[in-house]
Amino acid sequence: MESLKQSFVKLNPKIMVKNPIMFTVEVSTLIMLVVTIYSATNTSQGSFIYNLWVFIILFLTLLFANFAEAIAEARGKAQADSLRKTREETPAKLIVDGKVKTVSSSQLKKGDIFECEAGDVIPADGEIVEGNGHGYFTKGKILIGTADPEVMKNYIEENDMVILGNREEDQLKAIELNVSCIIVGMSIQVSEKVIKKAQERQIIIISSPYDTYTIARMINQSIPVNYVMKKDNLVTFNTEDFTDDIQDVMIKHRHRAFPVINKRGKCVGTISRRNFLDMHKKQVILVDHNEKDQAVDNIEKAEILEIIDHHKLGSLETMKPINFRNEPVGCTATILYRIYDEQRLEIPPKIAGLLCAAIISDTLMFRSPTCTQQDKIAASALALIADIKIEDFAREMFKAGSNLKDKAPEEIFYQDYKKFIAEGNVAFGVGQISSMDEEELQEIKVRLKPFMVSECGRHGITRVYFMLTNIMDESSDVIYYGEGSEEMGKIAFQQEPEDKCFHLKGVVSRKKQMIPAMMEAAQIMANDFN
């Protein structure tokens, strides 16, 4: 009765329009109804009886089509309800701590282990009609037997698994071919004859509530994990690993995905080559440098958004145009102060103090030849915001910065160290330390000389120099090590060293005074060599 009721409900045009063919029939039926009513009083549209019969035929066609559709929907709904009810009511023998506990299959969750025996209904999947429920399918193919029994023998072989329907002759033929397992769908009842034959040959028979397509699809999900999983020599990555490092490993191992392990040894996910396709480059802004050798490692794999600097142009290249602000001032902090001012942004006192300290340090309290009037103006404005007196602050800062007695030679050496590439592909490094105490500088010189010997040759650097700058005297001692370092220093500074040290009066700036001279010396040496 419900299907008959639905066949009338489905006459609603909003429902019929989803089926263009039947909607056209419905429109034709309505037109025929109007024609029939009109022909009752006017014969110009044909016979009333004829028009009435045409209308009735069209209307019954609509009802039968809707009725058939309603029955199909009702059957599908009933089947789905039945499967759902089967899942809710089917008991499962759950194994907990080695003991079997009977629970509803609806309570099972991922990772649970349950026991099945002959005659049991497999929770939500099917019933073992005959055979060993603990067996594994390890040989043969998985086939769907839909052909004639005589044709089946041409492609079914021993130990195959076959999905069949309700035809007994097909089931008997599969047993005759000595398959390992027969699966019948839609909860079809298997005859005693078939069960007896299967028992004689130790063939497993499973009855499933699903259709053939669903059974075939679910078989792929029924492989025991321990049959395919690898336990030894696993290739895994940690959550702290860098993508640049793991890419090389992924190239060597052709796995689809790799487990990712956190610090506690727990797998938190997987990563595959596909993940790298959508990976965005890290975005960086370079401040106070624009040379590749002075940038962070793998800078070429990052996206450079902007450069703010006051040094000479370096060798970096970008994939697209960027904002590049390069001004001939004594400190990059001066440029940053001007950007704040241009954008009308308020500078917090702490930031103002840091920027002011940078200007004082870079210009050596305005004594460096790189210092400009713009640096002095910026430092004065920043000092007002930070509420500091430049002279007192500079004295305390240099005193604190030059207190290097407790620092290791490596820490002192790399405190302000830069690498440069000169003519002839000569790589050399220059470090610098500034102090107001000449005695302390001499102590540092003694400590650094042995360390420079061990550092020379690292990172492709063949010549190492270190400036010990006396702020009060406005002079620098330059110590050196490496093949060709002394000759390069002689050409650059136009003097002979004393005790492996060049004494440079009036030289306090690495950028403006020392590096240009060193670059020119390297060029002269390269030309002489050629």
Image: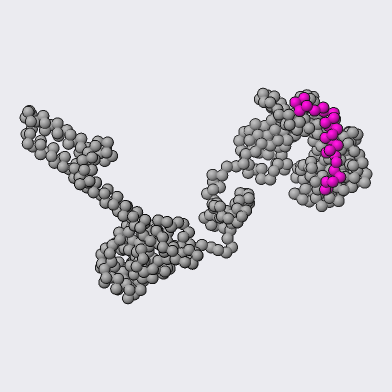
Residue 477 left/right relative to 281 = right
The image quadrant where one finds the C terminus is top right
Q: Is residue 291 above or below residue 195?
A: above
Residue 464 appearing in the image: no
Q: Is residue 428 above or below residue 475?
A: below
Q: Is residue 522 magenta?
A: no
Q: By what rule are the colours in the image chosen? A: one colour
Residue 231 appearing in the image: yes
Q: Is residue 193 above or below residue 233?
A: below
Picture coordinates of residue 506, whole percent (x, y): 89, 33
Frontmost residue, 414 versus 171:
171
Q: Is residue 401 magenta?
A: yes
Find residue 266 and report its image quarter.
bottom right
The residues colored magenta run 383-409
Residue 186 left/right relative to 428 = left
Residue for point 81% across, 48% down? 410
Residue 127 left/right relative to 454 = left
Residue for point 43% across, 57% down? 108
Frontmost residue, 107 versus 256:
107
Frontmost residue, 283 versus 188:
188
Picture coordinates of residue 169, whole percent (x, y): 25, 68
Residue for point 72% across, 31% down? 351
Picture coordinates of residue 286, whole percent (x, y): 68, 37
Find residue 503 and report its image quarter.
top right
Residue 392 left/right relative to 30 = right
Magenta region, mostly helix, strand or loop?
A: helix
Residue most extreme to the bottom = 200
Picture coordinates of residue 4, whole percent (x, y): 20, 45
The tally of labels here is 0
Residue for point 24% across, 37% down? 12
